[in-house]
Image: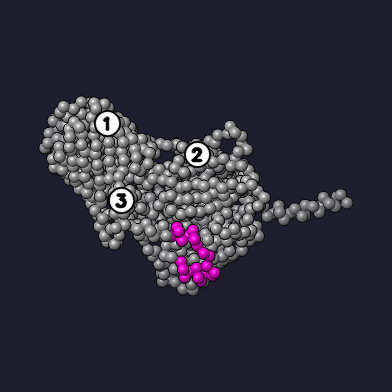
């Protein structure tokens, strides 16, 4: 009998053993010069196995993944995070936080089981490498087969592409340079406000000391689908196709719309959802959606991914024959914030339509994500017996200084949120900024909630927060270790909008290793002018809250540099918020009856974005000043300054600038001490 059991038991185990497998991949990270479609100027990029995006890694639920990541970069470490997968903490791939960085010339072996099915992706978590090409897709097929089958199954990885290095993009954002807004056609001006019929709203914004609103931060040179601006997967007319969209953009939300009719959503962030139809689908960075499209019997049909700010799009073409482009999406009205605030308010108060037809008819031109309509195919309600804790988290930031934070503090200032295994955490997000933020939690799925207690609330790993909007999520703390939580807008995370969820079970003395995530590097900035009669400007090393700077004011007559009058400040500025900074420094001068001195003071922003300052120096002198710049058209700005010094008394200037390039403008200026002249202004 015992021998018979030994023969029978393996027969019961055989199906499980056959269905599960060990699947191994090798990923080769290398640097090259690359251009999407070969049409743009090639720039330094990172490839995985020679391509951007990297290869699709395909598994079956229950498989064991073995992935060898080979770093062929000469001087740079790299990393790979397996976005959306539930896996052991040490395999999460965030350098230092969970996994050692992959040093140049070395290989790291990842090994983990595939616990759940769906569409996921992978990307670098080192520096800004994700922007330059280190990303790819992961598909985990369900063990029991796909519930919503289609004739074809295609992965579409969306991304954004810049000819500038991501480090230069980061420096530009910190410097406050308006070139990206000009390049995208979204720069705000008096003339633009008049054309839009929004001059009153423009002036109200200035009065309230708010900078001009923009939908996105960066002006990209291309938007890509599978590394191309137009991608054709070869789907035939009459077929149904499951398009697995992954937004791997560094800082671009995309609207999806098909010329063939509404998109049928069947999965979100991996898990399946009860199918719904939408005309337009807003996809945040790091989100994934599976949609089903039926290709009409004749013609070539576009599924378009349009950048949320309207600055460009990528295309997926289905079928063959006469081209049918998808409808263009209206560009946002940037002069009137009411439209954006109303969208967030309506989202908070959303009533779920009775049917797809009602929802499609009521869908706005620029919809928010359809979270209110998403429903899981299974019960997701958490055990009511578990202890519960609510944590409010405000999203805060400063577009001008480019500081991004939670509750007013960056990762470097307050980086850890302690959590306890076995509790249910409910996070109540409040967005105090005028930008969308896609928030991603590593190692966990969370339920996206509204005012109703839904048994089938959708499970996601990334959630969008609209401008001035609210969102509530909850999850069970059922892991261990340290897990990163951050805004998936790459440059926001890099400048502080991140936290580590640290399990208390690691002990009271445990301190997470932040790695690079709590660094606050200094960047060099310079701006000024060189004119026929004078030169003024400032150069500084700047991080999130400190400027180490030199400011100069040089005056001469007819290029007589031997008799140059100068005043040079060497100082430290401490930045508190957009309206308040303090300064401390030394002033060097050869002005008549003036001596070198130390000084300290305060800078304060007044209504209508008027900059003011007050300083006291070591000789008992006082200096007060006001300054204002106003953009008249996309290219023309007018500016003026006035100051009073107890030693030199009144000084004032006014001028005009004409924008030429990112770095240079033409300038003409009258200065009360130096007279009238003109030349070139610069920004670096």
Please determine whether, in this image, residue 622 is positioned above or below residue 221. above
Please determine whether, in this image, residue 517 is positioned above or below residue 2. above
Where residue 385 sits: x, y (%)? Answer: 67, 50
Q: Residue at x 30, y 31 (%)?
A: 600
Which residue is under mark 3? 207
**Circles 3, 2 touching at the beta carbon (< 8 Å):** no
Where residue 1 sits: x, y (%)? Answer: 88, 51
Left or right of 501 on screen, residue 569: left
> How many numbered tags mark residues here?
3
Chief SS of the magenta region: helix
Which residue is under mark 1? 616
Mark-to-mark CA distance, 3 and 2: 35 Å
Which residue is under mark 2? 415
Judge depth for marks 3 and 2 and give the one in front.
Answer: 3
Residue 466's disc is none
Mark-to-mark CA distance, 1 and 2: 37 Å
Q: Nearer the viewer, residue 82 or 530?
A: 530
Q: Which quadrant of the structure image shows residue 647?
A: top left
Instruction: Work out whether mark 1 precedes mark 3 in sequence or the reverse, and give the earlier one.
Output: 3
Identify the element where label 1 is drawn.
strand
Does the magenta portion include 32? no
Q: Which residues are magenta?
A: 343-363
Where residue 372 sits: x, y (%)? Answer: 52, 61
Instruction: Work out whether mark 1 precedes mark 2 in sequence or the reverse, and give the earlier one.
Output: 2
Identify the element where label 2 is drawn.
loop
**Circles 1, 3 touching at the beta carbon (< 8 Å):** no
Q: Residue at x 64, y 45 (%)?
A: 422
Identify the element where label 3 is drawn.
helix
Where residue 395 sits: x, y (%)? Answer: 46, 47
Q: Residue at x 30, y 45 (%)?
A: 606
Does any portion of residue 224 appear in the rendered image?
Answer: no
Q: Residue at x 45, y 62 (%)?
A: 367
């Amino acid at each position: 009998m015992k021998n018979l059991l030994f023969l029978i038991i393996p027969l019961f185990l055989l199906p499980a053993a056959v269905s599960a497998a060990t699947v191994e991949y090798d990923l080769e990270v290398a640097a090259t010069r690359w251009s999407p479609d070969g049409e743009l100027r090639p720039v330094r990029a990172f490839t995985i196995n020679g391509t951007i995006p990297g290869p699709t890694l395909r598994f079956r639920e229950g498989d064991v993944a073995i992935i060898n990541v080979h770093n062929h970069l000469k001087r740079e470490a790299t990393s790979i995070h397996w976005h959306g997968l539930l896996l052991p903490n040490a395999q999460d791939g965030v350098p230092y936080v969970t996994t050692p960085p992959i040093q140049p010339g070395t290989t790291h072996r990842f090994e983990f089981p595939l616990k759940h099915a769906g569409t996921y992706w992978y990307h670098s978590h080192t520096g800004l490498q994700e922007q330059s090409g280190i990303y790819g897709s992961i598909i985990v097929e369900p063990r029991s087969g796909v519930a919503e089958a289609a004739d074809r199954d295609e992965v579409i990885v969306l991304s954004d592409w810049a000819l500038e290095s991501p480090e230069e993009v980061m420096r530009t954002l910190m410097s406050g340079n308006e070139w990206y807004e000009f390049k995208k056609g979204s720069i705000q001006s008096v003339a633009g406000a008049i054309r839009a019929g929004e001059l009153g709203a423009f002036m109200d914004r200035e009065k309230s000391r708010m900078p001009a609103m923009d939908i996105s931060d960066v002006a990209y040179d291309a938007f890509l689908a599978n590394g191309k601006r137009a991608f054709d997967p070869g789907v035939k007319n009459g077929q149904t196709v499951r398009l697995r969209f992954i937004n791997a953009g560094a800082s671009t939300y995309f609207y999806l719309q098909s010329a063939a009719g509404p998109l049928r959503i069947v999965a979100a962030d991996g898990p399946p959802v009860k199918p719904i139809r939408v005309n337009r689908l807003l996809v945040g960075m790091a989100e994934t959606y599976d949609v089903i499209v039926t290709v009409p019997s004749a013609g070539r049909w576009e599924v378009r991914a349009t950048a949320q700010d309207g600055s460009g799009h990528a295309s997926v073409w289905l079928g063959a024959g006469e081209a049918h482009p998808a409808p263009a999406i209206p560009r946002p009205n940037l002069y009137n914030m009411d439209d954006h605030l109303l969208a967030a308010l309506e989202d908070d108060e959303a009533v779920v339509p009775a049917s797809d037809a009602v929802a499609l008819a009521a869908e706005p031109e620029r919809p928010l994500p359809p979270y209110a309509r998403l429903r899981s195919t299974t019960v997701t309600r958490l055990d009511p017996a578990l202890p519960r804790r609510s944590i409010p988290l405000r999203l805060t930031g400063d577009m001008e200084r480019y500081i991004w934070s939670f509750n007013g503090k960056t990762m470097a200032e307050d980086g850890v949120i302690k959590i306890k295994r076995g509790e249910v955490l409910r996070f109540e997000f409040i967005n105090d900024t005028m930008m969308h933020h896609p928030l991603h939690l590593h190692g966990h799925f969370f339920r996206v909630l509204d005012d109703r207690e839904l048994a089938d609330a959708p499970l996601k790993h990334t959630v969008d927060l609209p401008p001035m909007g609210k969102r509530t999520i909850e999850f069970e703390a059922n892991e261990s270790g340290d897990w990163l939580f951050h805004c998936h807008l790459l440059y926001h995370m890099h400048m502080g909008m991140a936290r580590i969820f640290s399990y208390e079970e690691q002990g009271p003395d445990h301190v997470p290793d932040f790695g690079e995530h709590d660094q606050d590097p200094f960047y060099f900035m310079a701006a000024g002018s060189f004119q026929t009669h004078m030169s003024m400007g400032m150069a500084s090393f700047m991080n999130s809250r400190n400027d180490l700077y030199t400011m100069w004011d040089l005056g001469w007559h007819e290029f007589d540099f031997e008799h140059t009058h100068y005043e040079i400040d060497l100082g430290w500025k401490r930045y508190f918020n957009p309206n308040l900074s303090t300064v401390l420094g030394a002033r060097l001068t050869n002005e008549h009856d003036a001596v070198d001195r130390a000084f300290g003071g305060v800078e304060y922003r007044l209504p209508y974005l008027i900059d003011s300052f007050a300083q006291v120096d070591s000789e008992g002198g006082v200096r007060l000043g006001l300054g204002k710049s106003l953009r008249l058209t996309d290219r023309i700005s007018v500016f003026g300054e006035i100051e009073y010094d107890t030693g030199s008394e009144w000084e004032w200037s006014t001028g005009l600038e004409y924008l030429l390039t990112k770095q240079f403008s033409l300038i003409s200026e009258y200065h009360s001490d130096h007279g009238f002249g003109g030349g070139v202004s610069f920004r670096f």
